[in-house]
Amino acid sequence: MAILRDLYQEVILDHNKHPRNFRVMDHCTRSKEGYNPLCGDHYTVYVRLEGGVIADVSFQGAGCAISKASASVMSQVLKGKTVEEANALFDEFRGLVTGRTDTEREAERLGRLAAFSGVSEFPARVKCASLAWHTLKAALEGGEGRDKVTTE
Amino acid sequence: MIEATLNTAQPQVDGKARLELCRHHFPLLRQRVNGKPLVYLDNAATSQKPQVVIDTIMRYYMEENSNIHRGVHYLSEKATEAYEGVRATVRQFLNAGDTREIIFVRGTTEAINLVAHSYGRVHVGKDDEVLISAMEHHSNIVPWQIVCEERGARLRVIPMNDAGELLVEEYEKLLTPRTKIVGLAHVSNALGTVNPVKTMVAMAHARGIPVLLDGAQAVPHMRVDVRDLDCDFYAFSGHKVFGPTGIGVLYGRESLLNAMPPYQSGGDMIKWVTFEKTVYNDLPYKFEAGTPSIAGGVGLGAAIEYLTKLDLDAIGLYEHDLLQYATARLSAVPRVRIVGTAREKAAVLSFTVEGIHPHDIGTILDLEGVAIRTGHHCAQPVMQRFGIPATARASFAFYNTKEDVDVLVKSVEKVIEVLG
C-alpha cells in the first residue's frame, strides 16, 4: 500500500479529479497534440507567449490519472516562466520521474513537481508522466506545426 | 522432471475439480508478484506453459536437436520425425483432412499475412472487395488493408451492435460478386464474442467466397473442427494454447493452397533450383521456407496432447461457469461497465470503471499481484466503436479459479477506493 500511495500522492489524485487550466485556449500562440499509442492518452497543450515569457498554458484531452495530473501541475508551474526556464524544468522533471534526482535533497526546488517522484518506481508509467511535457516542448520548438507528438 | 499427472487424476473427481487440480502443472503460477500470490488473468495475450511442455522443449534440445528434412544422420531423422509427428497431431486436433493442409508459421499474424499476400495478390483485383468484421484484431485488418491498397480494392467491414455481436443481416448484404475473401475472428480478443462462424462460412460459400477464420482466441477454449466449420483457412498461435512462442498454424484447404504462389522463398520450399528456374516443393513445404521453429513445433505438440487429454469440452464448460461468475461479481461493483455483452462469449471480460483510466486500474491491480491487460488490445476500431480509449481486460484459462475472480473483484474495489 505504501508504494501505491507513493505513486498516487494526494497532489496527483487532486489534480486528476480537478484538473487546472483544463480548457481550450482561443488565442494561443502555439498548440500541439500529444499521443501515447500504447495506452491511448491524448492531449492538446496550448501556450500563449508574451515576449519570450509563458503567459498562459492550458490543456484538453483524456488519459490516465498520472498523465492528466502531470499536465495540470505543469500548466501551473510554467506560468510566468521564460522558455529557457521551462526547458530547464522539463529536464528536472525527467530526472525526477526516471529516478535520477535525489528528491529529498531537491524537494524545495521541485515544489509541487515532487509529487511525481513515485513514478520512478513504475517504469511503465514514465511515459504517462512525461507526455504533456514532451508535447509542450514540441509546441515551444515547433511553432504552429500540426504533427502529433507521440511517446513511441 | 515433473510429468503432468493427467492420467493419474482420481477418476471419481468430476471434470471441474479435475481442471482445478491442473493448476499445479504450471510452475510459473506458483510465484508471488509484489508480495502477493500471482493471479494471472492475461491469458488472451499469452497463456502459461505446463511443465510437460517445458520438459519436452528441454528434452528436444538435450537429446534430439538437429535440422530437419536435410541430413541422413540419426539426429536429423529423429528431429524430422518429431516435427512431422506434430503436424499429424495438429491435423487431428483441428480434424483437417490431410497433413498437407497444415502449414507451420510463426503465429496467427504470419498465417494471415501468408493468405493475404499469397491468395490476395492472385485473387483480389481492382474494384474488388475484401470483407472483414468490426471486431478484428489489427492482424486481421492491416494485411488486408495493404493488399487492398496495392490492388486498388476496397476493405469492407461487417458492423456490430452495442453488445458486440456481428449483424448477420448486414453481413448478408455485404457479400457481393465483388467480394473475393472474408476474414473473421472466431472469438474476439477484445470483447470475448464467439461469432456464428459456421453460419457465416455457409453464407459466403453460397456465393462462392472463401473464408479465413482467425482462431487465436478460440482454440484454447473450445473444440475446433475445420471440416465441420467448412472454413477455407484457419489460423492459430501456439503460445495462446499453452505452447511456446514463435510457432503457429495455418490450416488451408488443399485445393486452394495448391493454386497459391509461395509466400516466402528459400530453402526447404523447393524441389529443384537452377539459375533459370525453380520448381517448388509440394504442400505443405511450399509454404515453409527456411529452418522453422523446430523446438517450438515439438513444444506445441506437447501442448496439444496435454490439452486434448484434459478434454476441451470440459474446459469450455468450466470456463463458461467461471466467466458467468466473474461477470456477475464484477458487474455488481458500482461504476463498472462490462464492454462486450454478447450472448455467446468465451473467457474474456473487458471492462471500464467510470472516471478511472484503465492504465491506472492495471497498475494498482499489478500491486495486488493481479495481471491483466489494459489498453486497446490491438483492436483500436473496437475501442472507437464503443467510444472509449481503452479497456481493462481480464482473460481466463482453465487453470483460473473463482478465488482468482474474487481477488480481481476485491482489487478493482481497491482501485476505486484509492482513486476515488
Image: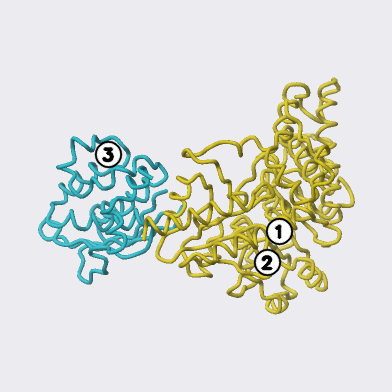
**Residue B334 visible in this rendered orientation of the protein:** yes
B341 is higher (above) or lower (below) than B246? below
Q: Position of residue B374 (x, y in %)?
A: 50, 54
Q: Chain for mark 2?
A: B
**Viewer-nearest of labels 3 and 2?**
3
Q: Badges 3 and 2: C-beta atoms under 8 Å apart?
A: no
Secondary structure beneath disc 1? helix
CA distance for labels 2 and 1: 9 Å
Q: Which residue was labeled with disc 3?
A: A95
Mark 2 burial class by Cα count in 10 Å: few <14, some 14-19, many 20+:
many
Q: Nearer the viewer, residue B15 or B29?
A: B15
CA distance for labels 3 and 1: 50 Å
**Which dot marks residue B120?**
1
CA distance for labels 3 and 2: 50 Å
Left-right relation of A32 to B226: left
Say which quarter of the image contains residue A24.
bottom left
- Give chain B's shade: yellow
Q: Badges 3 and 1: C-beta atoms under 8 Å apart?
A: no
Left-right relation of B383 to A98: right
**Viewer-nearest of labels 3 and 1?**
3
Q: Which residue was labeled with disc 2?
A: B130
